[in-house]
């Protein structure tokens, strides 16, 4: 596995651990349907929480959350709509970002709740 893939997997594992420690129930990791993907789908307090995880070794050039541009938001919302329809979910949805920065086993985690809202088309 390439080094960036190893870091990304470790970052996602750290994000899942963080969520579980904060009483989130993990429904799916790396959920895929065709070309659509959701990093983490969780639940808490009768809400569906869709979490985009961004892992970086450092923030020298940009903050990890800056990688969630309008195209990524659009794809995430489309994937979430597909997920909701497939699993027939009737609950409010929240979109979060978890940033994971540093080296494996020495990560700094930031949880940005309500990081974005679905755009109006």
Image (tube, rainbow, N blue to C red):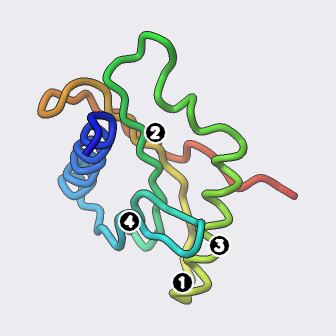
Residue placed most toward the observer, 105 or 35? 35
Task: Kindly state the secondary structure of the residue where label 1 is placed.
Answer: loop
Task: List the single residue furthest toward the left.
Answer: 105
Residue 89, numbered circle: 1
Q: CA distance from mark 3 to mark 4?
A: 15 Å
Name the residue rendered at 47%, 49% in the picture. 52
- Sequence-wise, which precedes: disc 1 or disc 2? 1
Mark 4 neighbour density, 10 Å: few (under 14) some (14–19) many (20 or more): many
Q: Earlier in the sequence, mark 3 or mark 1?
A: 3
Q: Which residue is mark 2?
A: 112
Q: Is label 4 in a helix, a strand or a loop? A: strand
Q: Does residue 119 appear left or right of residue 30 in this picture?
A: right
- Earlier in the chain: of badge 4 and badge 2, it is 4
Assign a secondary structure to mark 3: helix
Q: Quadrant of residue 5?
A: top left
Q: What's the CA distance linking mark 2 and mark 3?
A: 21 Å
In the foreground, 52 or 31: 31
CA gap, disc 4 and disc 1: 12 Å
């Amino acid at each position: 596995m390439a080094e960036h893939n190893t870091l990304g997997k470790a970052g996602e594992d750290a994000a899942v651990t963080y969520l579980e420690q904060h009483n989130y129930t993990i429904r799916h990791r790396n959920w895929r349907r065709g070309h659509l993907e959701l990093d983490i789908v969780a639940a808490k307090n009768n809400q569906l929480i869709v979490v985009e995880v961004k892992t970086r070794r450092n923030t020298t050039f940009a903050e990890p959350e800056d990688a969630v541009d309008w195209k990524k938001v659009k794809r995430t919302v489309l994937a979430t709509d597909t997920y909701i329809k497939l699993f027939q979910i009737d609950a409010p949805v929240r979109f979060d970002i978890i940033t994971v920065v540093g080296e494996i086993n020495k990560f700094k985690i930031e949880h940005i709740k309500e990081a974005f809202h679905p755009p109006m088309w």
